[in-house]
């Protein structure tokens, strides 16, 4: 019995001691975060002071910050709760967002005060955590009745009455989380401007994703933070968020931290060799087929790295009879069959030439690098109105069960009709007047009996025919419909993709051009859309855009505006409609952005818009050393053709949008037009290039290489204490480097004379015994043998750089007055004792608008470069074969200058010849190479040669001593006197230039006329 009691007692003690071990030691600690990227509330300082006072009175330690860098695992785990005090806008980056998600999942607490709902609109997880997003508010701070719905909770237990009458800024909300526990509402009958109706929550709490969250919309005014009831209300919310003050359990977290952006690099395969590429297909052996709009089918061979044309389709790609119209048709899409390895089918979507105005989906055999044009099987044709612009779409994708998806554009003109009184003006094209069909997208996108402005879904049969799968928008046999339609209501869904596991369809829809809202007459401004279809549906165009923002019916004969369209019951009453009048309800885009900055999706930026959809990634489908990590599993890669960004979209488990974050944002892309994943797991990029309808030098095919392992060190800088001097010349070189994995580094120094030395410290001291022109560099190697090499610094042994000084006299050495002379004298000392050649002194004066140190020597650079170049040519072996104005073995410099004086690329050509050498241009004599010359030195020599033929008025040097009467133009407040001197070299060592600048600022007491 005693043993039994002892056992029970031991278990009891063990149980409670283990419970206590979860509790933090000491007082709970909270973090108050008040960063703003939008409106900044004047009450924030009052809030900070009040919360700190509440902490002191209630034994809660309070830290405050505006620095988002604290959002990392190590720092956040110190806190029992985090308070967002009237934060606004996008305040956290992707890594910081992930760290905060992990904090909550580990059991952390959150308190949102007032404008915390005006924060992170494009982060769905946060929206659910805080409980809603700010939508609007009436002007001022009205008085209103707040209704206490639950006084059993810590944040409302101080209320004995059910009504709390007070003054505050009263938010209207959108995207309210229905799963929160409402503590308090506001009675919209007691003030004007409420938009949430009878149920208008103003404070709530809930458990969310492993943690606790409390929100109060109150707290706009400074007075709130000295109001007793409000402070008790806020304190109760903070205490709820703190909970039991337990140690966070990071074993429960599910969110991963995003990979560092420097783990991604772009590996070019072909550059500048494409002419309007449109879509690509990556074959099982990593060969890549690329379609080009004008009809070519190109093949990139992975084994040989060669690009060649393997097919050509005779396509309609420009208007034949209508001038000044950019037809966008041609070869628009290309994709391989899912069973390509066995059947060798390649699908294309193109516009065949001829009198039949259609866009055609066909397939061809491609085997042994031969594109068999005779093997064509025509699968589907889409009627198209030609000789107009625009919107073709034309992307092909396959989903689960080998379903083929094809996107088509609305085939409508977005521009105003010339000479017409009432036009589209960048809003929805709804003109159904006779003969104006091209200005009416209801005839195409909004027409259930038309294949344009759709995403089609079919199952291609063995013989090239097709069948209709279950689940399309209209069952087979439905009157006035086409059963091929999976989704409708698209403008230009230019690139689509299909989730290979879930079958969800993704596309970007390029939106209309209206710059401003005209909600009372026409409708919303233009938006590009990012869309997802988890099932068949109508996505609204041209009756709706973005999140179902409605356009208004419009009479193009009278200019009268009608009612706004209803997304729940869209009606297509266009005279050009051949389909159903009553359309399926409209589905909103999950993402949308205008030309200007977007509150909902601020990461999308500003400017032109061309939203595109890339692949959905799953790491377990691919096997390769550069495949993306598991972090990207289930994420959708999206991009914008014009803005140049790539993003990764995260979804909630039910498929709804959560957030998007930058993807490989260190990589620059030039109008990315297609993105695909290869069998090796690499993400391939096809870039159209920066010019419309042209062959672009920056078109490219490349892939993104992901380095999930060790990264080489990063070199920040390399310096050397002496760059010139007599021999023996002792220098000390230092390199600044860091290793991202914190590995120990070693340093391998290349001293430029054939010697290398290794050190364990980031510096070296070395003595040059022989004259010469040397280049010093360092390779930094980490413990895993990954290395990075610094730039090379020039050290000249045997000649010392001249020392130049400028003495200002007869006035201030810091200020100038326009019209009042400034006296100066330039002095030059050659440390080697050489005689100073006055012809090599160059003095100039420049006037600048501000103190830009990078521009101090702007005015004299070109001339002094030519002076230095002359000295360099005299010091090198060039003088053996060339003279300035006399014949020698090689051509005289003046003749060379005359030959290339009108050549825009003449300077770069001369630089190449000087460094690389050559023969055959002027005769049989070979010109020796000068590989040790820097690009800048070869440029100086080239400028000197060009100066011999220059007919322009040369800027002459000022005398070495004299006076300058300042004569700045309007706005110029800085005067810079610069002097340089180039010696003639020593001991067969190249000449060196020394320079000095003196900066004088305009006297602040000088009036506009330049007089005091």
Image (spheres, grey):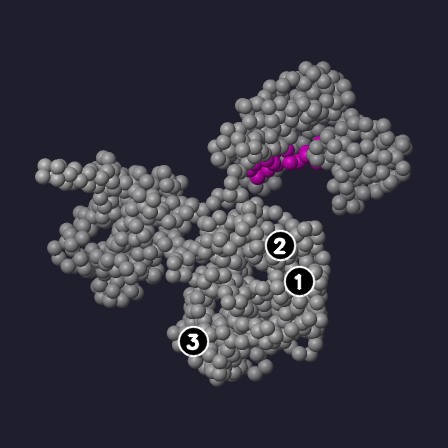
Residue 435 visible in image = yes
Numbered disc 3: secondary structure: loop
Tell me where residue 139 appears, x and y as whole percent.
Answer: 31, 59
**In-front residue for pair 68/854:** 68
- 938 left or right, relative to 18: right
Label 2 and label 1: CA atoms lie apart by 19 Å
Image quarter of residue 23: top left
In magenta segment, residue 849 = yes
Disc 2 target residue: 286
Tell me where residue 193 appears, x and y as whole percent.
Answer: 29, 64
- Mark 3 residue crowding within 10 angstroms, few (<14) / some (14–19) / many (20+): many
The residue lying at 56 percent from left, 75 percent from top is 466
- Mark 2 residue crowding within 10 angstroms, few (<14) / some (14–19) / many (20+): some
Residue 956 visible in image = no
- 168 left or right, relative to 913: left
Label 2 and label 3: CA atoms lie apart by 42 Å
Q: Which disc is residue 292 wearing?
A: 1
From what the image shows, is residue 619 above or below residue 328? above
The residue lying at 48 percent from left, 71 percent from top is 487
- First-in-chain label (2 vs 1): 2
Q: Which disc is residue 584 wearing?
A: 3
**In-front residue for pair 88/858:** 88
- First-in-chain label (1 vs 3): 1
Question: Which residues, given as a range, are shown in magenta?
Answer: 847-864
């Amino acid at each position: 019995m005693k043993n039994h009691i002892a056992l029970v007692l031991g278990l009891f003690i063990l149980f409670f001691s283990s419970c206590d071990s979860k509790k933090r030691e000491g007082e709970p600690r909270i973090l108050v975060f008040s960063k703003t990227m939008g409106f900044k509330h004047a009450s924030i300082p009052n809030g900070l002071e009040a919360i700190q006072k509440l902490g002191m009175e209630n034994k809660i330690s309070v830290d405050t910050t505006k620095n988002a860098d604290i959002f990392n695992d190590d720092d956040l785990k110190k806190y029992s709760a985090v308070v967002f005090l009237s934060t606004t806008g996008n305040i956290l980056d992707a890594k910081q967002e992930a760290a905060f998600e992990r904090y909550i999942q580990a059991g952390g607490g959150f308190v949102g005060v007032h404008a915390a709902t005006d924060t992170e609109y494009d982060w769905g997880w946060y929206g659910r955590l805080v409980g809603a997003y700010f939508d609007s508010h009436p002007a001022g701070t009205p008085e209103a009745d707040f209704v206490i719905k639950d006084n059993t909770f810590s944040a409302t237990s101080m209320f004995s009455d059910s009504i709390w009458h007070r003054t505050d800024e009263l938010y209207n909300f959108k995207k309210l989380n229905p799963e929160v526990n409402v503590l308090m509402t506001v009675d919209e009958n007691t003030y004007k401007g409420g938009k949430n109706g009878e149920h208008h929550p103003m404070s709530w709490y809930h458990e969310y994703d492993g943690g606790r969250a409390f929100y109060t919309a109150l707290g706009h005014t400074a007075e709130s933070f000295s109001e007793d009831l409000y402070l008790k209300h806020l304190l109760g919310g903070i205490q709820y968020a703190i909970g039991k003050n337990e140690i966070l359990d990071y074993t429960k977290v599910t969110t991963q931290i995003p990979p560092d952006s420097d783990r991604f690099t772009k590996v070019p395969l072909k550059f500048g060799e494409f002419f309007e590429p449109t879509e690509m297909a990556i074959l099982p052996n990593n060969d890549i087929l690329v379609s080009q709009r004008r009809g070519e089918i190109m093949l990139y061979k992975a084994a040989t790295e060669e690009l060649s044309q393997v097919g050509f389709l005779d396509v309609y790609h420009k208007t034949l009879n209508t001038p000044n119209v950019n037809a966008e048709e041609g070869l628009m899409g290309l994709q391989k069959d899912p069973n390509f390895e066995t059947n060798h089918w390649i699908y294309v979507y193109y516009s065949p030439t001829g009198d039949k105005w259609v866009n055609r989906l066909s397939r061809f055999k491609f085997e042994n690098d031969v594109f068999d044009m005779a093997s064509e099987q025509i699968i589907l044709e889409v009627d198209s109105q030609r000789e107009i612009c625009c919107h073709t779409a034309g992307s092909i994708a396959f989903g689960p069960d080998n379903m083929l998806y094809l996107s088509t554009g609305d085939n409508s003109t977005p521009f105003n009709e010339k000479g017409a009184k009432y036009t589209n003006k960048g809003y929805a094209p709804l003109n159904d007047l006779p003969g104006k069909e091209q200005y009416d997208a209801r005839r195409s996108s909004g027409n259930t009996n038309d294949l344009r402005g759709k995403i089609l879904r079919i199952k291609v049969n063995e013989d090239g025919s097709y069948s209709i799968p279950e689940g399309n928008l209209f069952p087979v046999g439905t009157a006035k419909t086409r059963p091929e339609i999976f989704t409708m209501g698209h403008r230009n869904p230019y690139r689509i993709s299909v989730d290979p596991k879930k079958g969800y369809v993704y596309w970007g829809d390029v939106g209309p051009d209206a710059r401003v809202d005209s909600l009372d007459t026409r409708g919303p401004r233009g938006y590009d859309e990012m869309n997802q279809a988890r099932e068949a549906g109508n996505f609204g165009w041209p009756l709706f855009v973005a999140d179902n923002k409605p356009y208004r019916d419009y009479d193009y004969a009278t200019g009268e505006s009608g009612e706004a369209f209803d997304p729940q019951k869209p009606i297509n009453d266009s005279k050009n409609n051949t389909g159903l009048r009553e359309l399926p309800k409209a589905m909103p885009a999950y993402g949308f952005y205008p030309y200007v900055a977007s509150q909902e999706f601020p990461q999308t930026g500003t400017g032109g818009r061309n939203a595109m959809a890339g692949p959905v990634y799953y790491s377990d489908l691919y096997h390769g050393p550069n495949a993306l990590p598991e972090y990207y599993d289930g994420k959708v890669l999206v991009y914008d053709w014009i803005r140049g960004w790539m993003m990764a979209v995260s979804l909630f488990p039910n498929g709804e949008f959560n957030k998007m974050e930058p993807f490989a944002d260190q990589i620059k892309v030039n109008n990315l037009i297609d993105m695909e994943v290869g069998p090796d797991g690499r993400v391939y990029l096809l870039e159209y290039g920066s010019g419309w309808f042209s062959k672009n030098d920056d078109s490219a095919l490349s892939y993104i290489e992901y380095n999930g392992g060790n990264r080489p060190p990063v070199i920040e800088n390399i310096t050397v204490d002496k760059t010139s001097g007599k021999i023996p010349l002792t220098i000390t070189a230092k390199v600044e480097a860091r290793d991202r994995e914190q590995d120990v580094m070693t340093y391998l120094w290349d001293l430029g004379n054939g010697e290398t030395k290794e050190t364990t410290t980031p510096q070296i001291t070395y003595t040059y015994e022989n004259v010469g022109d040397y280049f010093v560099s360092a390779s930094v190697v980490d413990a895993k043998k990954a290395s990075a090499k610094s730039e090379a610094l020039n050290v000249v042994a045997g000649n010392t750089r001249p020392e130049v000084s400028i003495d200002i006299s007869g006035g201030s050495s810091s200020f100038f007055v326009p019209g009042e002379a400034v006296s100066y004298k330039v002095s030059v000392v050659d440390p080697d004792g050489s005689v100073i050649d006055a012809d090599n002194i160059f003095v100039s004066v420049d006037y600048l608008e501000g103190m830009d140190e990078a521009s101090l020597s702007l005015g004299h650079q070109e001339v002094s470069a030519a002076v230095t170049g002359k000295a360099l040519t005299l010091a090198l072996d060039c003088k053996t074969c060339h003279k300035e104005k006399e014949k020698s073995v090689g051509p005289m410099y003046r003749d060379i200058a005359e030959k290339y004086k009108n050549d825009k690329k003449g300077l770069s050509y001369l630089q190449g010849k000087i460094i690389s050498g050559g023969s055959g241009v002027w005769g049989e004599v070979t010109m020796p190479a000068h590989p040790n010359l820097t690009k800048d030195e070869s440029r100086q020599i080239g400028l000197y040669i060009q100066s011999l033929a220059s007919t322009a008025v040369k800027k002459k040097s000022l005398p070495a001593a004299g006076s300058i009467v300042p004569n700045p133009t309007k706005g110029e407040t800085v005067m810079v006197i610069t002097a340089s001197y180039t010696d003639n070299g020593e001991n067969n060592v190249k000449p060196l230039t020394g320079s000095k600048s003196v900066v004088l600022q305009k006297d602040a007491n000088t009036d506009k006329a330049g007089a005091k």
